Image (cartoon, rainbow, N blue to C red):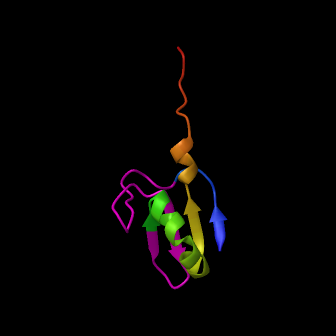
């Protein structure tokens, strides 16, 4: 499994496959296909998903990011 951290790739249109909330984690499966999860369900299912994943895109740090404010 590779953990990928880079510029945000998930948007507000990406939804958790479990509950429909905004997805912050995308799991690309070795067998093909992908699953998306909110932070809560990603944590809840991580032990089962890690052996099946070829890539995990985890953007949960965005939940705690402070927005940048420009002072003009």
Farthest residue in the right direction? 2
- Picture coordinates of residue 26 (x, y %)? 50, 65
Q: Residue at x 45, y 78 (%)?
A: 33
Q: In what quadrant of the picture does the N terminus appear?
A: bottom right
Left or right: 16 with respect to 30? Answer: left
Q: Is residue 61 visible?
A: yes
- The residue nearer to you, when weighing 25 against 48, is 48
Magenta region's main secondary structure?
Answer: loop
Where, by quadrant of the figure, is residue 2 drawn? bottom right
Q: Residue at x 33, y 61 (%)?
A: 20
Q: Is residue 26 visible?
A: no
Above or below for 70 versus 40: above
Left or right: 42 with respect to 4? Answer: left
- Picture coordinates of residue 37 (x, y %)? 45, 64
Indicate yes or no whether the magenta region holds residue 64: no
Q: Residue at x 55, y 35 (%)?
A: 66
Farthest residue in the bottom direction? 31
- Picture coordinates of residue 44 (x, y %)? 50, 68
Left or right: 2 with respect to 34? Answer: right
Farthest residue in the left direction? 20
- Picture coordinates of residue 71 (x, y %)? 54, 16
The range drawn in magenta is 9-35
The tally of labels here is 0
Above or below for 28 versus 10: below
Above or below for 69 versus 30: above
């Amino acid at each position: 499994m590779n953990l990928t951290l880079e510029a945000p790739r998930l948007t507000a249109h990406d939804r958790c496959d479990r509950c429909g909330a905004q997805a912050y984690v995308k799991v690309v499966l070795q067998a093909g296909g992908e699953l998306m999860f909110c932070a809560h369900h990603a944590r809840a299912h991580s032990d089962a998903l890690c052996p099946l994943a070829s890539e995990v895109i985890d953007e949960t740090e965005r939940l705690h990011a402070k927005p940048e404010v420009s002072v003009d």
